[in-house]
Image (tube, rainbow, N blue to C red):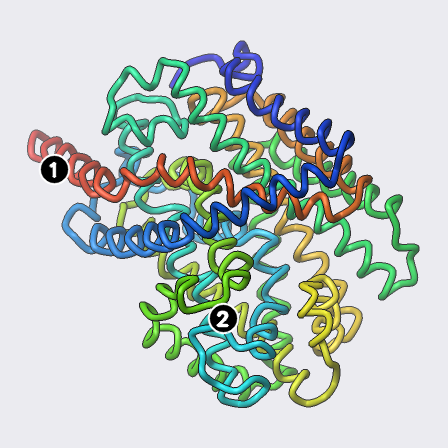
């Protein structure tokens, strides 16, 4: 693309009006009547989870299966962007994928979720709570929420469709382009396409502001517990300002500088933390738990993935499987844009294997180290997090488990830093992706990136000032936004393989001509 992005303003005016309008309306209504907004969104959240939860599960399951079949077909050898060599080195590429897609949520829930399922066994488990038999099902349930299905929907079939439409057909790098193979050119230039883009941007804003705000409360709580800082709104806003400055500067410098640097820093820090936990922690317990948990996950893959509200408590499905799956669906279009952007020169097979297999396996290992540590120390009587986790106080669980790890408060501080950089990586990559939606190509104006990064930080700050509960309300909103987004990505179940075939045929023809 040669279009001069510096002259584009904030991008599509309809997208700007709808997205900024959403931010202003949500904040304004919250200030006017916080309880009414919370009740309305909670009702929409419950309704969406009840009537579309099973659809979300099926969509993720089919996406994973079809993506894997596509990857290992002959069409998997087609190269994204029609260039012979990858634009970004393998380590940097994998680092960006892991840090952006796993984000702060993976670190935020890694310590607490497996322990929660150990204390309160999930519906697919028949093991008694707090027993050795409950460990594998607890880990397997966490693997299901953060494993193959979650990763596959974020960067496989949708990324293939966007890659082909943008790099081969020259169409804009926007969510509406996902529907181009189905409805054609008209959608790309009409108001409906703008509404589609706006829905996807709103979903990402809702999903990103939540982790940004929760991080501020988590780090503030951690600093007060570890170093005696005064936990309150002043410290939370200071943390938020520092976080926003980091990811906004990173977004300004672009894919090849700031985003890559933060991702590599995160991976190095995570490797150091993992090595310390493995070497100085209960190593044999980790090894046994991981093998048993992974085996339970793979053997019971379909039975765990297809648990519904008919066989599980409605509240459990709403706040666990449906919530997470809807969260990932809401992120999908913009994550797919980001994956397509950084994967030029990679084959479809490389991209899908990395996103849908390698990254989930790394995630399961990380959940075993942090969550397994929580289970081990809970079972040894070092602490009791039953009350905290029953109340979904995951910040308390994360810090408590972190302090019990080798290194004590220093390890806890390192994990807080890791979580911060994870969230910063998500903030900069999503600011970049939102700017690409407005620009329609891969080199958006850097001031647009700065604007969107700042807008999300301001929204988090205002909500924090109202109380962290309102951030939780916004987090629920992503389940509602997942409904229209799911319909946008639904056609990729068949257009993904079709565009992979078209990409492969074109490249084979060019090779034969040369």
Q: Is residue 355 visible?
A: no
**In percent of the image, x 43 and y 62: which residue is there?**
309
Residue lying at the far left in this picture: please name it: 512
Q: Quadrant of the N terminus?
A: top left
Q: Percent from the top left, x then y, of residue 68? A: 26, 56
User: Where, by quadrant of the figure, is residue 419 drawn?
Assistant: bottom right
Looking at the image, residue 206 sits to the left or right of residue 290; the answer is: right
Circle nearer the N terminus (2, 1):
2
Q: Quadrant of the C terminus?
A: top left
Vertical arrangement, residue 244 with respect to residue 417, above or below: above
**In percent of the image, x 85 and y 66: which residue is there?**
226
Mark 1 crowdedness (10 Å alpha carbons): few <14, some 14-19, many ≥20: few
**Labels 2, 1: front one:** 2
Residue bearing the label numbered 2: 365
Q: CA distance from mark 2 to mark 1?
A: 39 Å
Mark 2 crowdedness (10 Å alpha carbons): few <14, some 14-19, many ≥20: many
Looking at the image, residue 504 sits to the left or right of residue 183; the answer is: left
Q: Is residue 11 visible?
A: yes
Query: Quick one: 140 or 71, which is closer to the camera?
Result: 140
Q: Percent from the top left, x then y, of residue 235? A: 86, 47
The label shown at residue 508 is 1
Vertical arrangement, residue 73 with respect to residue 259, above or below: below
Helix or strand or loop: what does disc 2 sit on?
helix
**In percent of the image, x 39 and y 27: which residue is there?**
173
Looking at the image, residue 465 sits to the left or right of residue 8; the answer is: right
Helix or strand or loop: what does disc 1 sit on?
helix
User: Where, by quadrant of the figure, is residue 490 drawn?
Assistant: top left
Q: Percent from the top left, x then y, of residue 294? A: 41, 76
**In percent of the image, x 44 and y 20: which residue is there?**
194
Q: Percent from the top left, x then y, of residue 203? A: 52, 37
The label shown at residue 49 is none
Q: Are marks 2 and 1 in contact (CB under 8 Å)?
A: no
């Amino acid at each position: 693309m040669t279009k001069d992005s510096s002259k584009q303003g904030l991008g599509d005016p309809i997208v700007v009006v709808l997205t900024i309008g959403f931010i202003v309306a949500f904040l304004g209504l919250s200030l006017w009547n916080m309880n009414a907004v919370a009740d309305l969104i909670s009702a929409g959240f419950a309704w969406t989870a009840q009537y579309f939860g099973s659809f979300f599960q099926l969509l993720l399951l089919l996406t994973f299966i079809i993506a894997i079949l596509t990857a290992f077909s002959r069409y998997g050898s087609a190269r994204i962007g029609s260039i012979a060599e990858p634009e970004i080195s393998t380590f940097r590429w994998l680092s960006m994928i892991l840090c952006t897609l796993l984000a702060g949520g993976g670190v935020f829930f890694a310590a607490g979720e497996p322990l929660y399922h150990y204390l309160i066994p999930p519906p697919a488990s028949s093991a008694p709570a707090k027993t050795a038999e409950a460990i594998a099902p607890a880990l397997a349930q966490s693997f299901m929420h953060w494993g193959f299905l979650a990763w596959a929907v974020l960067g496989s079939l949708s990324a293939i469709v966007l890659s082909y439409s943008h790099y081969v057909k020259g169409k804009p790098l926007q969510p509406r382009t996902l529907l181009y193979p189905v409805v054609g050119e008209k959608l790309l230039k009409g108001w409906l396409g703008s509404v589609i883009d706006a829905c996807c941007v709103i979903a990402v804003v809702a999903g990103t502001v939540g982790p940004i705000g929760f991080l501020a409360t988590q780090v503030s709580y951690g600093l007060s517990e570890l170093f005696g800082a005064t936990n309150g709104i002043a410290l939370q806003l200071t943390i938020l300002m520092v976080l926003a400055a980091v990811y906004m500067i990173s977004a300004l410098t672009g894919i090849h500088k700031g985003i890559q640097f933060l991702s590599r820093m995160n991976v190095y820090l995570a490797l150091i933390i993992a090595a310390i936990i493995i070497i100085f922690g209960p190593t044999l317990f980790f090894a046994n738990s991981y093998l048993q948990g992974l085996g339970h996950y793979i053997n019971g893959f379909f039975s765990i993935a297809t648990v519904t509200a008919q066989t599980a408590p409605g509240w459990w499905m709403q706040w666990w499987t449906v919530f997470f799956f809807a969260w990932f669906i809401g992120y999908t279009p913009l994550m797919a844009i980001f994956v397509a952007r950084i994967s030029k020169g990679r084959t479809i097979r490389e991209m899908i294997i990395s996103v849908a297999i390698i990254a989930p396996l790394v995630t399961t290992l990380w959940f075993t180290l942090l969550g397994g540590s929580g289970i081990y120390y809970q079972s040894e009587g070092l602490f009791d997090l039953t009350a905290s986790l029953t109340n979904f106080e995951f910040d308390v669980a994360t810090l408590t488990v972190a302090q019990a790890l080798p290194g004590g408060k220093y390890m806890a501080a390192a994990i807080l830093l890791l979580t911060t950089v994870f969230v910063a990586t998500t903030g900069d990559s999503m600011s970049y992706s939102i700017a690409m939606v407005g620009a329609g190509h891969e080199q958006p104006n850097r001031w647009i990136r700065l604007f969107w990064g700042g807008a999300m930080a301001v929204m988090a700050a205002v909500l924090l000032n109202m109380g962290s509960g309102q951030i939780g309300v916004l987090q629920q909103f992503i389940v509602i936004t997942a409904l229209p987004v799911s319909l946008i990505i639904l056609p990729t179940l068949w257009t993904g393989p079709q565009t992979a075939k078209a990409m492969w045929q074109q490249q084979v023809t060019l090779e034969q001509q040369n």
